[in-house]
Image (cartoon, grey):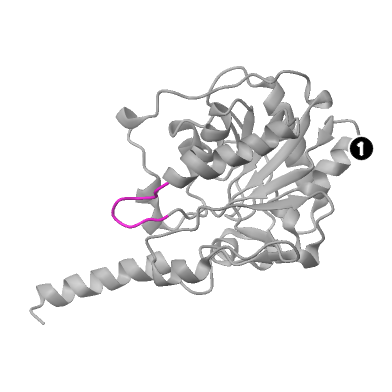
């Protein structure tokens, strides 16, 4: 979340944020943005893929040094090695998160009211 | 390549991340790096919601299950000698299998140590940190007050005491 880097930076320490949502990060005022097109939960890459993890971290360190203005964004070229339709499901929890379940419940309640139950 | 924010984002979540152009945040804090990265001390911060089972308790995922509009705002601390079997994970918005197989996908402590050895970074901070990214939701959106006023300033103070020069933030 952009607020994390923003708060650290306000405390006087430079940050670089590695993110799967670089456009959002920029708009929401993240100081330095490094974009990766990876599934959520995996900002540095796949488990046991030290080569990619090192590449992403090194790019983050370079961006720290090279970025000269707020919101400076660089996107990396790594391609996720798993097909999108599989990776899209694989990162998500097996059970819906409590807030997703809560929202579904609200929709059902509203529908019940509308239908006069 | 231009990274697509929406590639792995469920369509029903997209609205949460829409920032209209006129609401674009205008004040962006920006602190200049004081020395080269090769001479800098680097700390890592993730939002993966992980902890070291030997030294810390889990995030309060049970309370989040009872109160879905609430997310645990606290943080956990890690040393550079973290071993995979010590890592606990329970983030309710992610599949935790991969971070339980290799914490470096979110908190790259081992990769940082290697880059320090290779001379690409000055040193690793003695400690690194995990928050848990879900800070409440529902109609009013996340509430990051506790992060902003208490827990993140606490982490920043610890970092400054350790002589940290820069921070790599890895939201999940």
Q: For the magenta stretch, what is the residue range?
A: B136-144
Residue B107 painted magenta:
no
Q: Residue at x 58, y 33 (%)?
A: A8
Q: Residue drawn at (54%, 66%), measured in percent from left and top?
A: A89
When the figure is inspected, residue B70 is found, relative to residue B119, above or below; the finding is: below
Vertical side of B86 occupied by B20: above or below: above
The answer to whether residue A1 shows anywhere in this view is no
Q: Which is more toward the observer, A21 or B118?
A: B118
Give the side of residue B73 with respect to residue B142, left or right: right
- Classify 10 Å Cα crowding around label 1: few (below 14), some (14-19), many (20 and above): few
Q: Is residue B51 above or below residue B153?
A: below
Q: Is residue B23 left or right of residue B105?
A: left
Which residue: 63% across, 33% down?
A16
What is the residue that sits farthest to the left in this orientation?
A116
Label 1: state its secondary structure. helix
Q: Is residue A7 above or below residue A93?
A: above
On the image, the x and y values in percent for residue A35 come to: 60, 38
Quadrant for the C terminus of chain A in the image: bottom left
Q: Which residue is pictured at 32% across the width and 35% down the height?
A: B20
Q: Is residue B51 visible?
A: yes
Is A22 positioned to the left or the right of B155 in the image? Answer: left
**Residue underneath mark 1:** B117
Query: In the image, residue A19 lies at what x, y percent?
Result: 58, 42
């Amino acid at each position: 979340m952009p607020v994390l880097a923003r708060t650290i930076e306000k405390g006087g320490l430079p940050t670089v944020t590695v993110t799967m949502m670089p456009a959002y990060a920029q708009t929401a005022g993240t100081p330095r943005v490094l974009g990766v097109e990876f599934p959520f939960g995996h900002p540095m890459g796949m488990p046991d893929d030290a080569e990619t993890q090192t590449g992403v971290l090194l790019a983050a360190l370079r961006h720290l040094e090279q970025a000269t203005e707020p919101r400076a964004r660089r996107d990396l070229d790594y391609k996720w090695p798993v097909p999108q339709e599989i990776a899209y499901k694989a990162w998500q929890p097996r059970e819906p998160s409590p807030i997703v379940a809560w929202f579904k419940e609200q929709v059902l309640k509203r529908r019940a009211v509308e239908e006069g139950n | 390549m231009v990274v697509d924010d929406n590639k792995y984002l469920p369509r029903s979540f997209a609205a949460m991340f829409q920032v209209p152009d006129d609401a674009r945040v205008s004040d962006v804090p920006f602190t200049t790096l004081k020395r080269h990265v090769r001479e800098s001390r680097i700390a890592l911060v993730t939002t993966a919601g992980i902890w070291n089972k030997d030294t810390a308790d889990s995030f309060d995922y049970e309370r989040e299950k009872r109160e879905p509009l609430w997310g645990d705002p606290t943080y956990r601390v890690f040393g550079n000698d973290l071993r995979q079997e010590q890592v606990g994970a329970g983030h309710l918005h992610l599949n935790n299998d991969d971070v339980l197989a290799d914490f470096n996908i979110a908190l790259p402590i081992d990769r940082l140590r290697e880059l320090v050895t290779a001379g690409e970074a000055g040193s690793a901070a003695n400690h690194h940190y995990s928050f848990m990214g879900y800070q409440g939701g529902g109609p009013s959106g996340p509430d990051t007050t506790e992060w902003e006023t208490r827990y993140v300033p606490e982490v920043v103070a610890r970092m400054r005491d350790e002589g940290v020069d820069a921070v790599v933030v890895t939201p999940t």
